[in-house]
Image (spheres, helix red, strand yellow):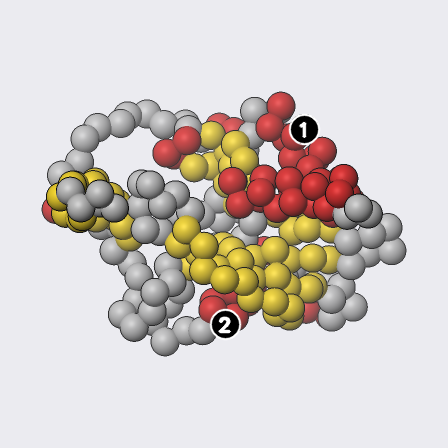
Amino acid sequence: MSNSLNLNAAKVTNVRPMANEDAKWLQLSKIDYLSPDGKARQWEMASRRTRPEGTSVDGVGIIAIIEKDSGPEVVLQKQFRPPVEGVCIEMPAGLVDPNESLQECAMRELKEETGYVGKVLTTGPLVFNDPGFCNTNTVIVTASIDMADPRNQNPQPELEENEFIEIFTLPLATFYESLEDLAKQGYKLDARLQNIAMGLKLAKLYGSN
């Protein structure tokens, strides 16, 4: 969909309970387990229905870096997220398709959501987004975007009909401060981005020690 749409015009109009059997993307389950003290206990959890067979990974997130004369910049996106009733600041991300490697998934999602063609730099370990609530997980892939590549001169996202995404960049040097400013403006921050920003800030504070 066109990035000229006003993302802030989106709003939640109704929230209602949903039976587990009616859910297309999510599954609610009750876990029976033995705790460290040997007692039988139960836990409620949510999981995705989309994880391909043969893989333990749900999806990838992409930290895409554009090298500029003024310094490296991170490619980010704004997207309305109904569960938090607001526009989120996120990294490009997506679910793994069947028979697709994590690197292939990352480059496909980067191209589809931002229009940019990138090169994989690193692939991180499997991390869990909210382990007390769900088993949803992700792998963070870092990528470089070469602006000398003709394919990156006029990037055109290939969004699905129900995707409304606005692409922008932030300087890596002021990443933490820029995210703080966006939060003050009312945007919702993806925890993965904030964790990366906090890591960069801590590296500046303690990196010389």
Name the spot of residue 178 as percent of width and height, x first.
70, 35
- Most foreground residue, 153 or 26: 26
Q: Which residue is mark 2?
A: 104
Whether residue 108 is visible: no
Q: What residue sits 67% from the left and 28% below the top?
A: 181
- The disc at residue 194 is none
Amino acid carrying mark 2 in the image: Glu
Name the residue beneath numbered marker 1: 181
Q: Residue at x 51, y 55 (%)?
A: 61
Is the residue marked by circle 2 packed among few (<14), some (14-19), or many (20+) residues within 10 Å? some
Q: Percent from the top left, x then y, of residue 103?
A: 52, 70
How far apart are the alpha carbons under marks 2 and 1? Answer: 33 Å
Above or below 94: residue 198: above
Left or right of 69 in this view: 196:
left
Q: Residue furthest front?
A: 37
Q: Decide which of tag 2 and tag 1 comes sooner along the chain.
A: 2
Drawn side of residue 92 relative to residue 83, left or right: right
Nearer-the-camera pick, 164 or 67 = 67
Q: Residue at x 64, y 64 (%)?
A: 143
Q: Residue at x 65, y 35 (%)?
A: 179
Tag 1, which secondary structure?
Answer: helix
* Residue type at the position of mark 1: Asp
